Amino acid sequence: MSAISLSAGAGAPDSPPKEAAAERARPRRHRWYRQPALMAGIGIIGVILVLVIAAPLITPYNPDTPNFSAALVGPSAHHLLGTDQLGRDTWTRLLYGGRVDLHIAFLAVLLPFVLGTILGSVAGYFGGWIDMIIMRLVDIVVAFPFFVLIIALVFVLGPGERSIYIAITLVGWVSYARIIRGEILVAKRQEYVLAAQSGGLSNLRIIGRHLLPNVITQAIIYAMSDIVQDILAIVTLSYLGLGIQPPTPDWGSMISNGQNFLTTHWQLTTIPGLAVVVTGLGLSLIGDGLADLMRPGQ
Amino acid sequence: MGRMTFVFRRLLLLVPTALGVTIITFFMIHLIPGDPARTILGIHATPRAIAILHREWGLDRPLVDQYWLYMDRLVHGNLGTSLYYNTGVSGLVTSRLPATLWLIIYAAVLGVIISVPLAMIAASRKDAVRDHVVRVVPLLGLGMPAFWLALILQSELGVRYQLFPVTGYGSGFFGHLHSMFLPSLTVAVALCPVIIRSLRASMLNVLGADFVTTARAKGVPGHRLFVRHVLRNAVIPAVTVLGINIGFLIGGTVIVEQVFAIPGVGQLMINSIFERDFPVVQAVALVFGIMVVLVNLLTDVAYAALDPRVRFDR
Amino acid sequence: MSQPLLQVDDLHVQIAGRRGIVRAVDGVSLEVPAGEAVGLVGESGSGKSMTLRAILGVLPPEARVTAGRVLLDGADLAHLGNSQLNKIRGPKIAMIFQEPMSALNPVMRVGSQIAEGPQVHLGMNRRQAAERAVDLMRRVGIPDAERRYRSFPHEFSGGMRQRVMIAIALSCEPELILCDEPTTALDVTIQDQILRLLTKLCRESGTSLVFVTHDLPVVAQVCDQLAVMYAGRIVERGSVQEVLTEPSHPYTLGLLRSAPDVDHPRSSLEAIPGSPPSLVSPPAGCRFHPRCKFAEEDCTVTEPPLRLIDAGHATACLHFERCLDELRTEGADR
């Protein structure tokens, strides 16, 4: 930018002392509760979590038991969103399905996060041949379309919840590894690291206590979008019949069940999809909000 | 000369990755617990069939030998034999490749057509209403299941308003254009969030750059300023981001082919999964892997073509 | 006296900052006679770059002209729309920037960038514009011009890039060139070359210059007139000769003292104590008074106006004679 960067307030002796003190007290980052994106995201996810956790309190129905006398009922007083072809209440299935999908997605993020962080730190900190090996591995895994690999792995391992966790872990660690490695490559040149090293601290301690806490934020921000990806993967697998097995409710199989009734009872398919979109929106807002927060102020 | 060596070096770097891809697909059989041959043949598992497979794949020989056999067949273009179709997989794949390629390219084109104007609108006035509105689009798109959007588009634009066919590939160029519109749009929608975000960010970056001020001070008028100076520089990082995410795009085509019943490679894969036709699943995974590797190469080439600094910096 | 080429009248530029409105340029008036070079000197943050950018209407998005006029041939540039301003930029007024590294489009060939002005403003076709560009490249001293027409900016050194910028500025034969610290980012040896080139070309074509810098010796080399800026205002103005030999503002004196002088080496360079004031809430009275060793009671009350103390020499210091006294005592000491 041009030579002048007018920094307002750069004049300690001349501004009244009160103002100067106040400027020092206010931290560089904006207060987190002032971020509209972050707050909106937290709000959305908060509402969703409350709803799915409190499901048994909110709805009297059982998500699994069929009730053929009330099959394919439209939205009404008894059934807020109607029922499906087996007479199961849609609103109930939506809430319970949310429980299943969300808890799997949130859990499924943890293992890749941990695995990727460990491998990424090692690769970034030590460099050399171990870095090369890990990065080659990353390149290879990345070479496959995410979904193709997931679906192939689930196929090989057999459908169901356990396979989902394994498949996502095997495939998902790479992004975290890359992010953490990148951050560590930069951070390890910082003075505080050199100081720790000359202080005789073990490498493990340096990585764990000094480096990681500073670089982990990028991984956390990424984790938000990763959860969204995982929800999509779970839901897609279930749609295909390879994921959550019936009769356990889940948004993907709900969409699949409802697809034959799109013209007559569109809510069976549309509503679960909207639930996914809104959840994705909330999580993305949180991720973006966090990213804005972490960005150095201008 | 500089650019060619750059491309060549990228090509060389791809070789180990491509090899790695073959290793992984090779290993997929061995992830299955128990005798791979028995599991693969499933209901076709007669002792004779098992023996044939053992011999063909060298299942009782050391792993390295098995891999050698695998690579040997690969190099000769032999991707194995489908258990379901009872014919060579290579033939199956090549017959279905055109439809998938159509889908990918059409989706990329639509994605660019939708995203570039939106990114321009957002970047032209940062933090204004129009910017916020455009920025919501990717947030919705990122969380949208492709198959769900596919079903809705099918039902509304296909069945209800009869604007497009709901299934199939169509015939002839315009037939394809028509039949593939909905599926490509679905995949494009999955692509737009990535393009819009990265293009907007790089445009904002460029708009604040010194050389844009120089161009303004030269009196370069708006449209010329935008295309020759801003856009020309902004696409460079966006191309890289697109390339990184292309794997995701290609993966998205799998499910879309399923919903729209497009006779492509993705649909082949899913059908084979349900038929437990293992050789096909393995081969298709390999094909997808190689496809992504090639697209990454293409991205690097495009980057080198667009950015003259590349010759020297690498 | 003939009409000046450019007249800046009480210009005010404000920037919307996070902590308040920054009064970057707070009532600046300037006259640029035809064929002369006017220097604008001050520290970082004094508002000199903003003044230049306001003239051409290329302020950053957060900044705006809130009052004042910029008169060129009778038209007020500050109130012209962008498309009208585009007709001025290039053929009438051109600008050279500080950072040659980032001021050129990295993906466009150097020759095309020079040729762009003539294509847009002079209606030349590609071939004609290219010929003119090569010609300009020779004039600014770029060797092997024909071949280097097709080069990209990153293939040039800093000094060469600045020559390219000068070529761009000259491409539509403007009446005035605004220079925003064009040599600050260059090596000292190259600085001299570029300055000589610039002065030579401008004298040859009778082009006026407004030369912004924080470097006094440079001003002495290039300019005829000089204005010193502090905290968004002009505090002293006059011919280069007068201002540098008889500085009439403590700030000017301070600048002179902090610049190394080969002819009169001092044992120590004096920095001006304190730091530039906040432009959100500047000090009351004379803005320089907190750092001024001649400051008195009346300096803190009202903002002193720019007054003529001699033909063509004006100052905004109430006690300007103290500066001259200082100089005399210093001269006596030597």
Image: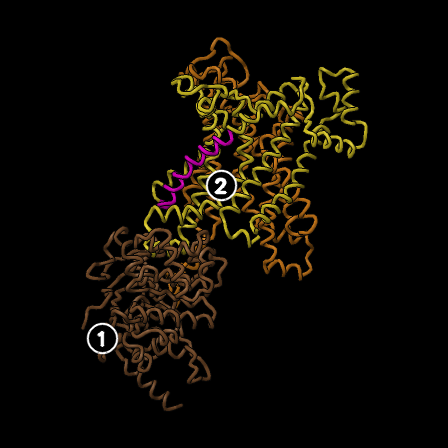
Chain colours: A orange, B yellow, C brown
Secondary element at image label 2: helix
Looking at the rendered structure, the secondary structure element under dot 1 is strand
Where residue A29 sits in the image (x, y, percent)? Answer: 45, 52
**Residue B55 position within the rendered picture, expressed as x and y whole percent measured from the top left:** 79, 24
> At 38% from the left edge and 40% from the top edge, which residue is drawn?
B132
* Mark 1 crowdedness (10 Å alpha carbons): few <14, some 14-19, many ≥20: some
Q: Was residue C22 drawn as part of the magenta stretch in this picture?
A: no
Q: Which residue is mark 1?
A: C307
Question: Is residue B107 a member of the stretch shown in magenta?
Answer: yes
**Of C261 and B68, which appears nearest the observer?**
B68
| Residue C168 visible in the current orientation | yes
* Tag shown at residue A274: none
At which x and y percent is residue B282?
A: 66, 27
> Between tags 1 and 2, which lies in front?
1
| Numbered tag placed on residue A287 in the rendering | 2
Q: Amino acid at mark 1?
A: Arg
- What range is drawn magenta here? B103-127
Host chain of mark 1: C
- What is the chief secondary structure element of the magenta stretch? helix
